[in-house]
Amino acid sequence: MVIATTNSQNVQKSKSKMSENIETAILANGCFWCTEAIFQQLKGVKSVTSGYTGGTVKNPTYKEICTGTTGHAEAIQIKFDTSIISYQEILEVFFSTHDPTTLNRQGYDVGSQYRSAIFYNSENQKDIAMSFIEDLTNAAVFEKPIVTEVTASTIFYPAEDYHQNYYNNNKTQGYCVAVINPKLEKFMKQYQSKLKKQ
């Protein structure tokens, strides 16, 4: 009995330690079909959920989001293991895989729902984000000013089921072939050492 209890306690401690390493990032950088597919590839990322946040309407639908009147952004909620990948590394991928200088637009996707935004979950995340943007600005990484919104996270509403894991479930769909594939290929070449084993 003592041995069984000890093993059980060890398992609980192990689970507790693992949960302590899990942090959540909420980012908006264009169509979540694209951003979800990118962050799913990273080592240390446990899950990516597409959804809506930053608006005023409760339980918004995709149809409502597309009007651009709810105030929400298409966003992704990333759960990641900080012992494998840091929040700063998450932001590095975030800024390198979209244009943070275009207001309410990413490519052909136009509207406030496609704005560049970081929704921080702690003061530490806020400090890291603000410092990261300052460093990018001082280094003149982008020709135009960064317009990424940095604001406290509120309610994150998961998108409808058919939006989840969209790219992996619809690889032959036109948007995936024409838009996501080129972005994904470029990203995978740039971050090869940080990708999960296929």
Image (tube, rainbow, N blue to C red):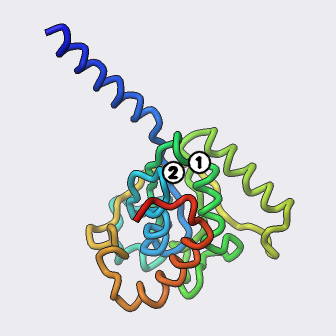
Residue at image point 35% right, 66% down: 60
Report crowding for label 2: few under 14, some 14 to 19, many 20 or more residues within 10 A (C-alpha): many
Q: Nearer the viewer, residue 128 or 59?
A: 128
Residue 127: image x %, image y %? 69, 43
Q: Secondary structure at mark 1?
A: helix
Residue at image point 64% right, 45% down: 126
Query: In the image, is 197 to the left or to the right of 101?
Result: left
Residue at image point 58% right, 55% down: 90
Q: Amino acid at mark 1?
A: Tyr
Residue at image point 53% right, 44% down: 121
Q: Please name the residue that numbered disc 1 is placed on.
A: 87
Q: Amino acid at mark 2?
A: Ala
Query: In the image, is 60 to the left or to the right of 72?
Result: left
Up-down relation of residue 109 to residue 46 (above or below): below
Up-down relation of residue 174 to residue 20 (above or below): below
Q: Please name the residue that numbered disc 2 is placed on.
A: 25
**Dot placed on the residue nearer the N-terminal end, 2 or 1:** 2
Asked whether the residues under the numbered discs 2 and 1 touch, taking CB atoms below 8 Å apart as contact, a structural biologist would say: yes
